[in-house]
Image: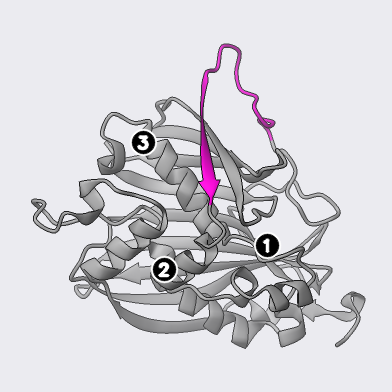
Amino acid sequence: MRGAGHMRIPASAVGITVGPREDEVDARWLMAYAAALGEHGPEYFDTTRPGGILAHPLFPVCYEWPLALDVRAKAVPDDVAVRGVHATHRLTLHRPPRAGDRLSTTATVVALERRTPGAYLVLRMETVDAAGQPVSTTEYGSLYLGVECESAPHPNPLPRGEREDGTLSPQGRGQGEGPPGTRWWSVDVPIAPTLAHVYTECARIWNPIHTDRAIALGAGLPDIILHGTATLALAISQALRQQPRGAATPVRAVAARFGAMVRLPSRLVVRGQAPRPSPAGAIVHFEALAEDGRPAVRDAELVLAP
């Protein structure tokens, strides 16, 4: 393997496209994803429900993951790929996925930027239904720690704010802070020792650092860790439970940055605020703190549809 100082992602990675890849969404997949997150409401499981069962707002990560792997294989050398960590996530739901959908997803590298910890690469994944109508758009940002790159910045990036060790530092609102008089709700969420294994199979998202201790240790991790998307999904679930409509609350968009690793077993503390009006829709700010108190998900927001 080359030394980290000699690792580089070339600017030619920007524009690499894979897909379209087709996936059939069925009730089994939707229910399995919700079950992995510990959901139990009828909105996610009652197949007699008028209009059918709902997809969890973060379900698009399930059909997007294979595209992320395909792009990585084309754009990033193997010895660089192992240094990648999920750093940012921005999802727009044009409409929720539904059982019976046949979806087509295309992924494109849209930005590459040098940041303090390494190379920051943004992948845009666009999904349409069988009629060609948009369903979801995700911008998935990865940091390749210690890796150089030739910058081709994104025109509308998520906030910066990294530390030298690659973790994400506070940006704007600090941990537990907010405008004067801000009230926060807070919920403890236990993380079972087997959650990463269950999430892997139910989401159909397999990365061995989450389930194979030998591989996790070999990659320099302290142990297996929970998927970033699982951590974010758990936090979204808690934010929705604070809303009057619960799981049935329509979500238009999600944005978040990732930080601390979540060990298994452990616990999360999910905190959030009441919705605030904005031109885009009501916005719920929230965060998830790892067991050591460091933010695992920060600067996160849900945009609720009317």
Q: How far apart, in angstroms, are the residues tagged by discs 1 and 2?
A: 31 Å
Name the residue tied to disc 2.
203
Residue at the image position 41 percent from the left and 54 percent from the top: 37
Q: What secondary structure is marked by label 2?
A: helix
Pair 1/2: label in front: 2
Pointer 1 with pointer 3, Cβ within 8 A? no
Horizontal and vertical percent position of residue 289: 63, 40
Q: Which contiguous range is marked in magenta? A: 172-191
The residue where tag 3 is placed is 241
Q: From where the camera sits, is residue 211 visible?
A: yes
Percent x, y of residue 60: 39, 63
Seen at 70% across and 78% down, the residue is: 215
Residues under numbered marks 1 and 2 in contact, where contact means CB atoms less than 8 Å apart: no
Neighbourhood count class around disc 2 (C-alpha, 10 Å): few under 14, some 14–19, many 20 upward: many
Q: Residue at x 72, y 78 (%)?
A: 214
Q: Earlier in the sequence, mark 2 or mark 3?
A: 2
Which is more N-terminal, label 3 or label 1? 1
Percent x, y of residue 160? 71, 48
Tell me the kind of residue under disc 1. Pro
**Mark 3: amino acid:** Arg
Position of the C terminus, as image quadrant, is top left
The image quarter in which residue 220 lies: bottom right
Residue nearest the observer in this picture, 13 or 81: 81
How far apart marks 2 and 3 lie (CA) works out to: 21 Å
Q: Calculate the distance from the C-alpha at mark 1 to the C-alpha at mark 3.
A: 37 Å
Q: Secondary structure at mark 3?
A: helix
Kindly tell me whether residue 16 is visible in this rendering: no
- In which quadrant of the rendered image does the N terminus lie? bottom right
Residue kind at label 2, given as amino acid type: Ala
**In the rendered image, the vertical position of residue 67 relative to residue 46, given as above or below:** below
Say which mark, if any, is on residue 8: none
Q: Main secondary structure of the magenta part?
A: loop
